[in-house]
Image (cartoon, helix red, strand yellow):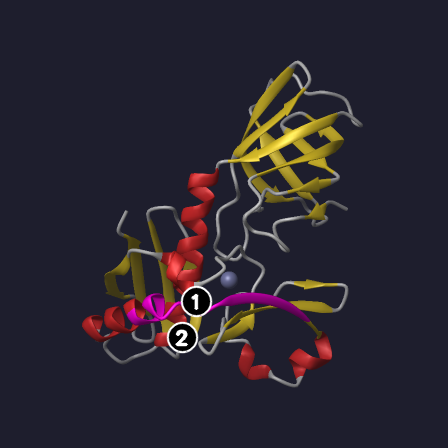
Amino acid sequence: MTEILFRDDSYLRECQATITDADGDTVMLDRTIFYPTGGGQPGDTGRISWDGGSTAVVNTVYGDGGEIHHLVAEGDALPDSGTRVSLEIDWDRRYRHMRMHTALHLLGSVLQYGVTGGSIGAEKSRLDFDMVDAVDKDAVNDALQKLVADNHSITCRWITDEELAAKPELVRTMSVQPPKAAGKIRLLDIEGVDLQPCGGTHLKSTAEVGGVRLGKVEKKGKHNRRVSIVLDD
Ligand SMILES: [Zn+2]
């Protein structure tokens, strides 16, 4: 399996790796900084380079067996397995995903309802809440700004299945199963704000979210409010 470097350090922009398999439009590596599509967050794009060549990574996804597939342009000549390569992600795009992803955690802490869906983009992101109340846009936006300004620290840690089972209130996302690996679950802790299972890439502190504000709020059915956020730069 591929060693997943972005889980321990989401700020890695480049690293060295070795190709373990390259077939058609798919490259597999012994380690990676490329986040695969999942949990509402898009897969990373970027570049794989080697002695004498390189190829663009147009998307990163999980294969059927859970392995990480780096998708490249069909027809690009790929080096053999065992070749040492340099990886580089499209950092500007990923960093916006990290700001958005972290901001959605903040939004979820402001609106304490079940989350039934969500989507992260570099320009716009949203959460769907299982709620019938109207959303007070000004109040939610103010609360969001305060959480950013107060600069809460953000860390990750792993707990066991048993520890999570003892705290079912941690799982507020109704549509997404928490990421598990060998009986352990990754918890995201926004100090004093939010604690929940998550496998995505986050910032180190809430101040790094920077300029963010509430976008559209749409009523999508009796029990569903779709709340969007946008970045200001
Ligand atoms: Zn997250």
The x and y percentages for residue 93 are 43, 41
Residue pictured at 61% horizontal, 84% vertical: 167
Residue furthest right as drawn:
82
Q: Quadrant of residue 182?
A: bottom right
Could you classify mark 2 by the number of other residues whose Cα lies within 10 Å: few (under 14), some (14-19), or many (20 or more)? some
Instruction: Establish if 190 lies above or below 42.
Output: below
Q: Residues within 10 Å of mark 1 (few under 14, many from 20)?
A: many
* Residue 193 picture location, percent across and down: 44, 76
Q: Position of residue 33 (x, y in %)?
A: 61, 43
Q: Give the labeled residue for mark 2.
A: 109
Q: Which residue is mark 1?
A: 105
Q: Secondary structure at mark 2?
A: helix
In the rendered structure, does residue 111 fall within the stretch colored magenta?
Answer: no
SS of the residue at dot 1? helix
Q: Position of residue 214 (x, y in %)?
A: 26, 62
Q: Nearer the viewer, residue 182 or 95?
A: 95
Which residue sits furthest bottom? Answer: 166
Q: Residue at horizontal 30%, vertical 60%?
A: 228
Question: In the image, is residue 71 above or below residue 5?
Answer: above
Quick one: which residue is furthest to the top in this view?
A: 52
Q: Amino acid at mark 2?
A: Ser
Could you tell whether 183 is left or right of 104 in the image?
Answer: right
